[in-house]
Image (spheres, grey):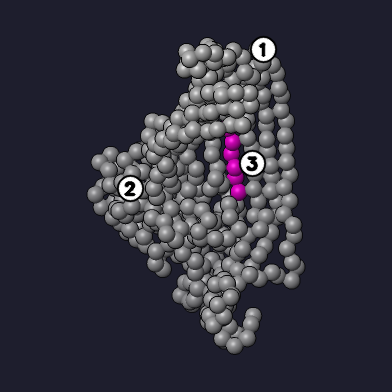
Amino acid sequence: MGTGAQAAGNIVGYYAGNPDTAYLTGIVFPEGIRDPMVLNFYFGVQREILPKTMLEVNYVGTQGRHLFRAENVNRLPGINLPAGTQVVDSLGRTLTGLGRPFLNPNYGNLRVWENVSKSWYHGLQVSVRHQATRGLAFNANYAWSHSIDTGSTWHSGATSANGAAGGEGFSSDVTMPGLDRGSSIFDIRHRLSFSYVYEFPFYKDQKGFIGHVLGGWQYQGIWAYQTGAHWMPFCGRGAGCDYNKDGQLIDRPNAPNGNSLSASHDMWADGWFNTSNAAYGCAIGTGGGSTCNNGLPALFAVPCLACNGNLGRNTFVGPSMFNTDQSVFKNIKIREGKSLQFRWEIFNAFNHTNFLLPNGTAGGNRGNRIATANYGKPSNFGQSNGTMNPRNMQVALKFIF
């Protein structure tokens, strides 16, 4: 494991004097790692339902096996209990404390590459396409899909909104990676889109002054709606957040009042506990239970000693998205092979507010993190980390030759 300072032990597995080394180790066990494998399934039908109008229905499925995960193997559930302490967790396992956060105290996080992750995807895709007829062409598409995995990133605290939460950083329980099986961070259950182009039929030849003024106009639009992506709250502030006592502050709490919550516009904007219609009175109940000191239900509760929380991974659904882009084009013929195109385009035409997910990464608003024993109301829990682009307009003149 190295020479000099790195071999002295009791550090995070790297030599701080070398600026070219990574903060975390990248170990491969002697048995090595395998190439990941993806199985693909597809079945589809197409039919012309009207002249120049095609209906297509497809089932698309994939299964990923032997996917990479960088796992911290220097831990076990229960080892961070006082030395010699034995408890029985919610899974019936007898856990013994070692009085330390690392299984091998000579090292810190030992990040090992393993082929332990899996993924599943099922999708129903329906589209209707109409070829240009009398100046009108359109496409309508709908997709129902479900993407499931045991981890949406190979290892990182910054590549998804969940940050270092269990299943996105290291697994919640190194001995039971299946506990992190849940919806992918990028899972979008429903998506509907509609686009069209209409070329006005009059004065197509653009003869004369009137023809150049009234001819060559096009109207185009794109409408899109989708349900929210998935995210998860986790406890990552202070030693009390290590619910299963394995030394990692990435644990999910218990969810005594449900594994999800339908948030309002104000809750995404201001935080879930900062609105007058908040359904819950606090993040974690008094004494870690399921009731707040004001009598309202708590959103979460503390699991039993050295137990994994029963909140599922990515069971919370983020804000939905609605957007429409509209544009008007005017094509002006100059001579054979040369023309001008005037473009007026409006993006997010209705200036609809589309919220981003709460974000637990470095630089994010930490809106998906709860505190060690937060019996109060975390000021920004559930608050969006920002919004997508507001309405934007642009005008352009294009010379085509």
Foreground residue among 233 and 394: 394
Foreground residue among 202 and 269: 202
The first of marks 2 and 3 along the sequence is: 3
Cα separation between marks 3 and 1: 34 Å
Tell me the kind of residue under disc 1.
Pro
Q: Which residue is mark 2?
A: 271
Tell me the kind of residue under disc 3.
Tyr
Is residue 209 shown in magenta?
no
Locate residue 395: give its quadrant.
Answer: top left
Q: Position of residue 192 (x, y in %)?
A: 53, 29
The first of marks 3 and 1 along the sequence is: 1
The magenta segment is 143-149
Q: Dot 3: few (<14), some (14–19), or many (≥20) neighbours within 10 Å? A: some
Which quadrant would the C terminus be assigned to in this image?
top right
The first of marks 2 and 1 along the sequence is: 1
Cα separation between marks 2 and 1: 51 Å
Q: Is label 3 in a helix, a strand or a loop?
A: strand
Q: Is label 2 in a helix, a strand or a loop?
A: loop
Q: Position of residue 30 (x, y in %)?
A: 74, 71
Foreground residue among 391 and 272: 391
Q: Dot 1: few (<14), some (14–19), or many (≥20) neighbours within 10 Å? A: few
Q: Which residue is mark 1?
A: 51
Q: Position of residue 237 (x, y in %)?
A: 39, 64
Q: Which residue is mark 3?
A: 121
Locate residue 155: give its quadrant.
Answer: bottom right
